[in-house]
Amino acid sequence: MLFPNLPTKTLGGSFFWDTLQSRNGWKLQKNIITEHYRILDPENVRQTWGNDEVEMWHAFQKFTSGSRE
């Protein structure tokens, strides 16, 4: 499930985050403690977050393909 999100500037995941995929500056990351996911844009602004891995992979595909349905 994707949760409501306000884009938030981050440090880019230097601590507590595993980067699962990186494409065109975008990153899909998983928190090593809480195990939730987030997607960062090329400026390290969190664009969305959630706890459902499949939904997050789909969202990552949409962000990185240029298609924002």
Image (cartoon, rainbow, N blue to C red):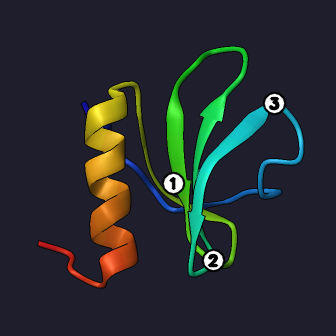
Residue 20: name its quadrant: top right
- Is residue 4 visible to us here? no
Q: In the rendered view of the protein, which quadrant contains the N terminus? A: top left
Please name the residue that numbered disc 1 is placed on.
39
* Front residue of 48 and 63: 63
Please name the residue that numbered disc 3 is placed on.
16
* Front residue of 20 and 5: 20
**Residue that appears at 26% across and 39% down:** 55
Q: In the rendered view of the protein, which quadrant contains the C terminus? A: bottom left
Are discs 3 and 1 less than 8 Å apart at CB? Answer: no
Please name the residue that numbered disc 2 is placed on.
25
Kind of residue sitting beneath label 2: Gly
Q: Position of residue 23 (x, y in %)?
A: 55, 72
Q: Residues within 10 Å of mark 1 (few under 14, many from 20)?
A: many
Q: Residue furthest left?
A: 69
Q: Residues within 10 Å of mark 2 (few under 14, many from 20)?
A: few
Q: Position of residue 60 (x, y in %)?
A: 38, 58
Kind of residue sitting beneath label 1: Ile
Between circles 1 and 2, the one closer to the viewer is 2
SS assignment at label 1 = strand
Q: Is residue 6 above or below residue 51?
A: below
**Residue that appears at 81% across and 30% down:** 16
**Residue that appears at 57% across and 81% down:** 24
Identify the mark nearer the N-term, 3 or 2: 3
Cα distance in 3D space between marks 1 and 2? 11 Å
* Front residue of 56 and 45: 56
Cα distance in 3D space between marks 3 and 2? 19 Å
Identify the mark nearer the N-term, 3 or 1: 3
